[in-house]
Image: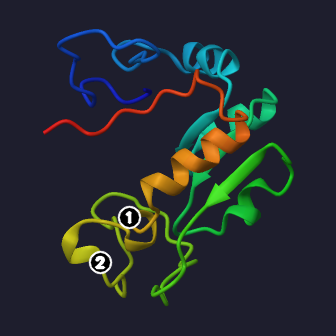
Amino acid sequence: LLGAAGEIAPQKEPRMGLRIVSDGVTFRQRAALIETSDCFLGPDSSLVHVAGALSVPAIGLFGPFHWNVRTKYNPLTVGMMRLEGFGCAHCFHHAHGRNQFPVNCPTKDKGICGVLDAILPAQVVAKIEEITAGEEKVVAFAAQE
């Protein structure tokens, strides 16, 4: 799991196949970790593009931008998004400062991008299994309460 410093809670017990890479890790170290991966999953971000540049199959989770606009140059990158029920899809909004959501965002009061939130975890896991040919090395964990 990649994240910002302090963003991912430490695990009480180590889990096989799970590495947490956040505190004190450089961009170069993150890229090196991605290069060792069978498949990379992440939000629309620079790391999705790093995976593509390193020829690592990647799944990008997209909301404000259509995935094909951002990744059409890389056949190993697949984009996932849910458009049904969201007239706001492809708003092309860049979050900055206090303006995290566009004025007309129907889910801004919830503090989420509804288009991203509507992507079903089961669909993501199924796509990862498809890309990795369903190998047993795919590691997925249920959220802990």
Classify 10 Å Cα crowding around label 1: few (below 14), some (14-19), many (20 and above).
Answer: some
Residue 59 percent coordinates (x, y):
64, 46
Q: Are marks 2 and 1 in contact (CB under 8 Å)?
A: yes
Mark with earlier residue (2, 1): 2
Residue 89, horizontal then vertical, whole percent: 53, 80
Q: Which of 11 and 96 is in front in this view?
A: 11
Question: Could you say where residue 18 lies in the image, as x and y percent from the top left?
Answer: 42, 18
| Nearer to the camera, 25 or 121 | 121
Amino acid type, mark 2? Thr
What colour scheme has been applied to the protein in the rendered image? rainbow
Q: In which quarter of the image is residue 4?
A: top left
User: Alpha carbon of mark 2 to alpha carbon of mark 1: how far?
Assistant: 10 Å
Q: Position of residue 137 (x, y in %)?
A: 58, 21
Q: Left or right? Give the position of 55 relative to 36.
A: right
Q: Which residue shows up at 31% across the image and 38% down it?
A: 142
Residue 117 numbered mark, or none? 1
Q: Label 2 belongs to which residue?
A: 107
Three-letter amino acid code of the residue under disc 1: Asp
Residue at image point 32% right, 57% down: 97
- In this view of the protein, which residue sits in the foreground, 24 or 52? 52
Under circle 1, the secondary element is helix
SS class of the residue under badge 2? Answer: loop
